[in-house]
Amino acid sequence: MTLHSKIETAIDPVKLDRLAEVAVKVGLQLQRHQDLVITAPISALPLVRLITSHAYKAGAGLVTTFYSDEETVLARYAHAPDASFDKASGWLYEGMAKAYDQGAARLAISGENPMMLASADPEKVARANKANSIAYKPALEKISNFDINWHICSYPNPAWARQVFPGVSEEEAVHLLAEAIFSASRINTPDPIAAWNDHNANLKKRSSWLNGERFAALHFTGPGTDLTVGLADGHEWHGGASTAKNGVTCNPNIPTEEVFTTPHALKVEGIVSSTKPLSHQGTLIDNIQVRFEAGRIVEAKALKGETVLTKVLDTDEGARRLGEVALVPHSSPISASGVLFYNTLFDENASCHIALGQCYSKCFLDGASLTPDQIRAQGGNSSLIHIDWMIGSDKVDIDGMRADGSKVPVMRKGEWA
């Protein structure tokens, strides 16, 4: 038996098939005759094959997959000429944007090695990321504006598994990570689709309460944190399943434990410290501390990865402002697991978090009908990036602040008040 086949046998095939089914039926709610564009690391081929099968069973028109590979990415940093790092495949993203314009759905499988670029030149990493962000914008706008039904799920890449579960064999690490993914994604329940229906209903109750309160701001307090996040004018809270502009109700992220909305790009004040590491483009950024004035980060430092953090903040004007604020109870299943995934899709669902950069237009009342200028006028941020990082813990309190200055407890010690 080869090592590759050993790794695959470490993953429960029944549960992997359930994950694929949930991705198509809950994550995407793929429609009959709808095309699907998939991006995935090549290590996720077993999951891609299962998702493709379920997509066609659901009546998909055409499924097209684009693969990435760690070795070929590293080859660029080892051997490419300097000018390479200011280039990106804009033609590819233009093609994706065209597919979305024509009604295609989008599915991304995450699972890359979180430390893939840890030894690469941070300057080259930053340049390549910026070039890619610029090229990706036509496609990203279709996603961030929620024009289409889209979804992200994960596959336990061996390199990722070794990072999350060091000190055991690669086979055992993959097994442990796979089980953690299945648990967080509610695949271990007798009826995962029914479990997601119930969970979506609970998240809807939370977002409905927050929408009823119409807070002007949220005040976060905790160790190294005293932060007031003003909320955008006409903001709207969302969580779990959402309806895209094409009329399809989907779950963009699996797993998800958050309710989230749009901050006001000009009304964030104070200091905040991260409570979990941020894995970004192969670099681990840890112990982030920043200070906001008039919505903009004016001071930033990190114990690890500070150079990369600085480059991220210099991507464009909007990179130093917030595009999202999200509330997650400390007792969420992902937090309770005690696993640090080094993957934002999971770690953000263990903790309250904020996101630098681009806002979601859907997080406004009647957001589907608002123009970019109207979103900007109401406080929505615009940027080439959207990067979540965690600021919640069992030591953080959150108050909702009304326009008249009165306060309402929202969270105490990381739990809903």
Image (cartoon, rainbow, N blue to C red):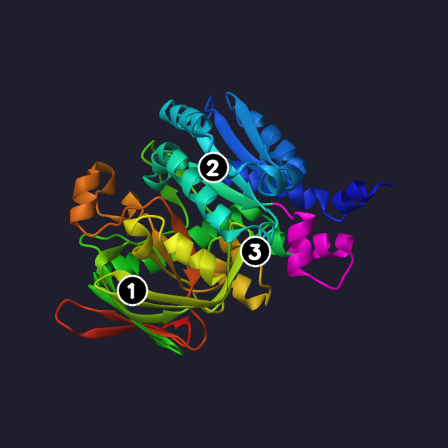
Instruction: Tell me the residue at 44%/25% (across/down).
Output: 91
Residue 20 vertical position relative to residue 297 in the rendered view, above or below: above
Name which residue type carries label 1: Val
Find the magenta span and give its range.
155-179
x then y, percent, for residue 253: 47, 47
Q: Total label count? A: 3
Q: Which mark is residue 184?
A: 3
Query: What is the CA distance from the residue labelled 3 to the residue labelled 1?
Result: 36 Å
Instruction: Name the mark nearer the viewer: 3 or 1.
Output: 1
Query: What is the CA distance from the residue labelled 1 to the residue labelled 2?
Result: 39 Å
In this rendering, position of residue 342 left or right of residue 270:
right
Query: Is disc 2 in contact with disc 3, using a CB cutoff of under 8 Å?
Result: no
x then y, percent, for residue 89: 47, 30
Earlier along the polypeptide chain: callout 1 or callout 2? 2
Instruction: Name the mark nearer the viewer: 1 or 2.
Output: 1
**Residue to which mark 1 is pinned:** 298
Most common secondary structure along the magenta stretch: helix
Q: Could you say which quadrant of the image residue 177 lies in?
A: bottom right
Instruction: Tell me the residue at 36%/70% (across/down).
Output: 272
Residue 62 is at least partly visible in this image = yes
**Residue to which mark 2 is pinned:** 28
Name which residue type carries label 2: Leu
Asked if the stretch drawn in magenta spans residue 401, the answer is: no
Kindly state the secondary structure of the residue where label 3 is placed: helix
Instruction: Tell me the residue at 62%/42% (across/down).
Output: 78
